[in-house]
Amino acid sequence: MADRIKLGMVGGGNDAFIGGVHRIASRIDDRFELVAGALSSTPEKSQASGAALGLPRIYDDYKQMAQREARRKDGIDAVSIVTPNHVHYAAAREFLKRGIHVICDKPLTSTLADAKKLVKAAEDSDALFILTHNYTGYPMVRQAREMVANGDIGTIRVVQVEYPQDWLTIEQDFKQAEWRTDPARSGAGGSTGDIGTHAFNLACFVTGLEVDSLAADLEAFVPGRQVDDNGHVMLRFEGGAKGMLWCSQVAPGNENALRIRVYGDKGGLEWAQEDPNCLWHTPFGEPKRLITRNGAGAGEAAARVSRIPPGHPEGYLEGFANIYTEAATAIASVKAGEAVPQDVLYPTIHDGLKGVQFVSACVKSSARNAAWVKLDH
Ligand SMILES: NC(=O)c1ccc[n+]([C@@H]2O[C@H](COP(=O)([O-])OP(=O)(O)OC[C@H]3O[C@@H](n4cnc5c(N)ncnc54)[C@H](O)[C@@H]3O)[C@@H](O)[C@H]2O)c1
């Protein structure tokens, strides 16, 4: 076993949501060790949150952490950024400029201008940038991507992707809702930025296609809400495929109902996040086939990111861990002066930029009565 990668964390303090998921995901394959943190927005809360986790090195803020860790011989190799969206840019830049690898949650940034500046900062850095669009780490999503690439469903014509939730159906005052509905911290998109970016990324990841242009009808249904809580988006892919993306946080009965259906001229594929170990393959003119994780018909791409036999469920935490483990493999390769293996498929900063471009184009299109807007690649 290679040495564990020394990890720091920005955000993820007491009462935070996704920081805890990142900590679990980083440990599932035992490739990381969390040694430092600036876990919250004030020095007092950062100290208290770090102490609660028993972290060896606790900092008042991310800038102090980046400066001091970069000076240590045993400083962190990588940092996970799990703050609200508006902090991603400034925090990531501090670590990139010191050559510390960045693992950052989505959306990449809260503004398109910051996303472009961050791409430049990453290109100027020797460090890697990994974006946790975690759904790309699920084995059956890898299977779907492999089947599309193998031509199993032929030339893609239609992509239907949706991510409905219901938790913002009414006004909520807890912290996760509060910053997500504030455009200064969330960005100009609400549901589009928070979950639409996941759906958009999944559609591109599975199909291998780029979106050329979109037309969006966004709505803030809850009175007084300043960002969209529902979005209907038509997609035109390069090469002629057509798609529809629905994201909603006001659809009662839906928890995390991310689902994708892809149809080509030979057949279709269907995957749903809440039943993640299954993938339906519908070859035209033949009975539907159910492919299960590690079961008959599942291929190499899925097997590589599966841990346990079929029938024992793997899910959200394992999918997240697959992104972390691929990050670990890539970081270890860079440390050894070797090329990153080609089967490492974690989302990059360029995927992050595309996500922020998607949000920006949706907002622009919707403001123009759902006019078609070209994505600026
Ligand atoms: N990939 C996923 O499935 C997924 C799921 C949920 C959230 N997210 C993303 O993760 C990020 C965090 O979301 P969350 O739901 O955990 O939010 P949260 O409000 O639960 O937690 C945010 C944490 O960041 C801390 N923080 C705020 N400003 C900070 C600063 N300047 N320095 C250090 N810490 C700071 C807060 O104190 C808190 O501990 C968001 O970008 C969100 O979009 C991704």
Image (cartoon, grey):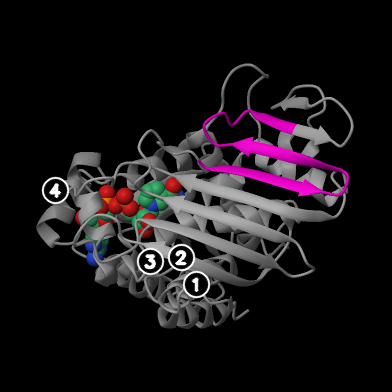
Report the residue marked by disc 4: 48
| Residue 189, numbered circle | 3
**Hey, what amino acid is under mark 1?**
Ala
Q: Secondary structure at mark 1?
A: loop
**Some atom of ligand 1 lies within 8 Å of the CB belonging to the residue at label 3:** no
Q: Quadrant of residue 238?
A: bottom right
Report the residue marked by disc 1: 370
Local packing at callout 4 (Cα closer than 10 Å; few below 14, some 14-19, many 20+) is some
Taking the image in four quarters, ligand 1 sits in the one at bottom left
Above or below, 295 against 63 in this view is above
Residue 67 visible in the shown view: yes
Q: N-terminal of the two: label 4 or label 3? A: 4
Q: Nearer the viewer, mark 3 or mark 2?
A: 2
Q: Secondary structure at mark 3?
A: loop
Local packing at callout 3 (Cα closer than 10 Å; few below 14, some 14-19, many 20+) is many
Which of 94/286 is in front?
A: 286
Q: Are marks 2 and 1 in contact (CB under 8 Å)?
A: yes
Q: Is residue 107 left or right of residue 44?
A: right
Q: Which residues are magenta?
A: 258-280
Measured as percent of width and height from the top left, residue 370 is found at 50, 72
Which of 145/104 is in front?
A: 145
Q: N-terminal of the two: label 3 or label 1? A: 3
